[in-house]
Image: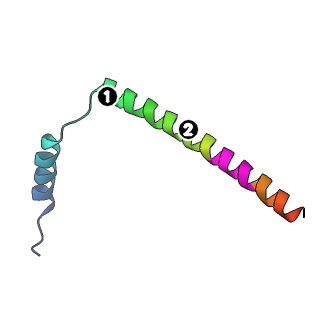
Amino acid sequence: MAKTNPFTFIQQVRTETSKVTWPTRRETIVTTVMVFIMVALAALFFLAADQLMSMAITWVLGF
C-alpha cells in the first residue's frame, strides 16, 4: 500500500469529514436522555434479577 504524505492525508480527512451528516443539538440531547433511561432500566432489571437469584440460592441452601 502506497504511503501518502501528511498534507494529502489532511486533505483526505477534511474531504471525508465534510461528507458526515452531523446530528442536531436536539437529536443529541434526545439520544443522550434515551441512553440514560435505558441504562437505568437495565440497572433495575439486573438488580431485581440478582435479588431473586440470591433469595432462591439462599432458600435452596437453607435445606
Examine the image and state in which quarter residue 44 appears.
top right
Q: Residue furthest right?
A: 63
**Mark 2 → mark 1, Cα distance in angstroms:** 21 Å
As displayed, is residue 51 above or below residue 8?
above
Residue 13 screen position, x and y as percent:
16, 51
Examine the image and state in which quarter residue 60 appears.
bottom right
Which mark is on residue 27? 1
Identify the residue shown where x is 9% and y is 57%. 8
Residue 51 screen position, x and y as percent:
73, 49
Q: Earlier in the sequence, mark 2 or mark 1?
A: 1
Identify the residue shown where x is 13% and y is 48%. 16
Q: Nearer the viewer, residue 50 or 31?
A: 50
Q: Amino acid at mark 1?
A: Glu
Q: Which residue is mark 2?
A: 41
Q: How many marks?
A: 2
Q: Quadrant of the C terminus?
A: bottom right
Foreground mark, 2 or 1? 2
Residue 40 screen position, x and y as percent:
57, 37
Q: Residue furthest bottom?
A: 1
Q: Which residues are magenta?
A: 46-53
Identify the residue shown where x is 49% and y is 38%. 38
Residue 52 counted in the magenta span: yes
Q: Secondary structure at mark 2?
A: helix
Query: Left or right: 41 with respect to 48?
Result: left
Q: Amino acid at mark 2?
A: Leu
As displayed, is residue 14 above or below residue 27?
below
Query: Left or right: 38 with respect to 49?
Result: left
